[in-house]
Amino acid sequence: MFRSKNYKESTKLFDKQTLYVPEEAFDLVTKTSKAKFDETVELHVRLGVDGRHADQQVRGAIVLPNGTGKENRVLVFCKDERVEEAKAAGADYAGGMDLVEKIQKENWFEFDTVIATPDMMGTVGRLGKVLGPKGLMPSPKAGTVTPNITQAVSEAKAGKIEYRLDKQNIIHCPIGKVSFGAEKLTENYNALIGAIIKAKPAAAKGQYIKSCVTATTMGPGKINSQKQL
């Protein structure tokens, strides 16, 4: 695999065999960022569960203390009489069947979070095949299917992220930007890890958190110490 000069230089600043505590890992993340833009810092957590079993699924959502550093475009599916309420709360788009058709006919996806009131899920369900693969389908577990539009939109705008297992039993989440600095990134990390630990399934056996790696969009991974988890 081709690696850029900046990538190779970055790997010289840390030891791949060393387990770093979170503060050290995020200090290295900020120091090794070489991109000309403010890179997103990502967290990848491998869990000791088997997501193929319903009783070992890990999924939830949390508002990060310092947000994600990204402007979150919010779409709300609601009845006509609640459209103004959604927009007043900060939603970028709000509506019903008109937005469903726009997505279906125009392949429109200029949004990052989808929220729906419970009475709209029959309509939103038609988009399952297109929203699901993109991780955009509203879910009660993520707090994105709710009658409380104002709270849901406010949380989404404040930096709420959803975490869930992929097919390899790994959770991938953005936890901020390089410009946040090590302290704020560590605060976001601690909040997310705390939520993942609380979400541990009763059916999970053995070591729950197998590994925890943080990296920037364009950079190499730095391993956090399990002693801190």
Image (spheres, rainbow, N blue to C red):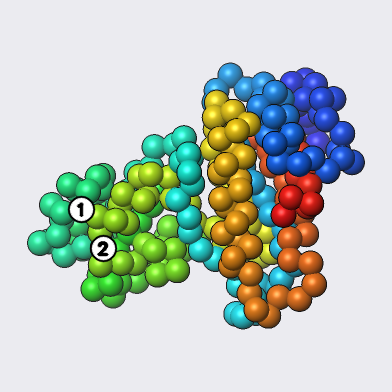
Disc 1 to disc 2, how far (Cα)? 10 Å
Q: Can residue 73 be seen from the camera position used here?
A: yes
Q: Can residue 104 be seen from the camera position used here?
A: no
Marks 1, 2: nearer the viewer:
2
Residue lying furthest right: 17
Q: Measuring from the top left, give residue 224's x and y in whole percent.
A: 75, 44
Secondary structure under tag 1 reads helix
Q: Residue at x 39, y 63 (%)?
A: 143
Q: Which residue is mark 2?
A: 148
Amino acid type of the residue tagged 1 in the rendering: Ala
In the picture shown, does residue 52 fall above or below 9?
Answer: below
In the picture shown, does residue 192 fall above or below 128?
Answer: above
Residue lying furthest left: 81
Horizontal arrangement in the rendering, residue 102 relative to residue 14 (left or right): left
Secondary structure under tag 2 reads loop
Q: Residue at x 71, y 71 (%)?
A: 49
Classify residue 210 by image quadrant: bottom right
Q: Nearer the viewer, residue 9 or 155?
A: 155
Q: Residue at x 81, y 36 (%)?
A: 1
In the picture shown, does residue 157 fall above or below 130?
Answer: above
Q: Residues within 10 Å of mark 2 (few under 14, many from 20)?
A: some
Q: Which residue is mark 1?
A: 86
Horizontal arrangement in the rendering, residue 215 relative to residue 68 (left or right): right
Total number of numbered discs in the rendering: 2
Q: Measuring from the top left, give residue 45's x and y in whole percent.
A: 69, 54
Amino acid type of the residue tagged 2 in the rendering: Asn
In the picture shown, does residue 214 fall above or below 139?
Answer: above
